Amino acid sequence: MKLVIAIIKPFKLDEVKEALSQVGIEGMTVTEVKGFGRQKGHTEIYRGSEYTVDFLPKVKIELAVPTEQVGAVVEAIAKGAKTGKIGDGKIFVLPLEDVLRIRTDERGDAAV
């Protein structure tokens, strides 16, 4: 199993969710986060004063998926999140040792 973590632009969440449902993903965890990469933030003017916004709003998606599905999941996220502009985000794939469904005590792929 693998843990797939994606950091994307917030307005792309619905498209990513739809793309994931088309490849059979039924569950995910979504968190509102802030961060920056090469984008480095931007400047804004508020009440006549200019200030720098360093941390930009993003959405973090976390999914536990069977190893066989990782390619399709990564492709679906990339397709749904892509705008072609800086700040589209990143996808990380990490090994996942075990999963336990608390209610039924199922483990591994069955728990996902």
Image (tube, rainbow, N blue to C red):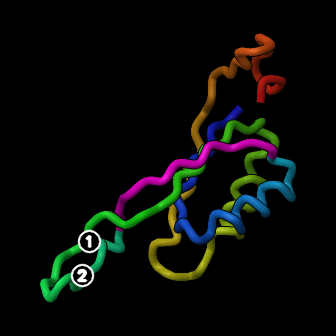
Badge 2 amino acid: Thr
Marks 1,2: beta carbons within 8 A: yes
Above or below 62: residue 18: below
Assess whether residue 34 is covered by the magenta stretch: yes
Q: Residue at x 59, y 79 (%)?
A: 83
The disc at residue 63 is none
Give x and y (percent) for residue 45.
22, 85
**Side of 27 relative to 47 (left or right):** right
Q: Quadrant of the N terminus?
A: top right
Query: What is the secondary structure assignment of the residue under circle 1?
Result: strand
Assess whether residue 109 is covered by the magenta stretch: no
Magenta part of the chain: 26-37
Above or below 31: residue 97: above
**Side of 33 relative to 44 (left or right):** right
Q: Which residue is mark 1?
A: 53
Badge 1 amino acid: Val
Mark 1–mark 2 distance (CA, rounded to whole Å) = 6 Å
Query: What is the secondary structure assignment of the residue under circle 2?
Result: strand
Name the image quarter holding residue 19: bottom right
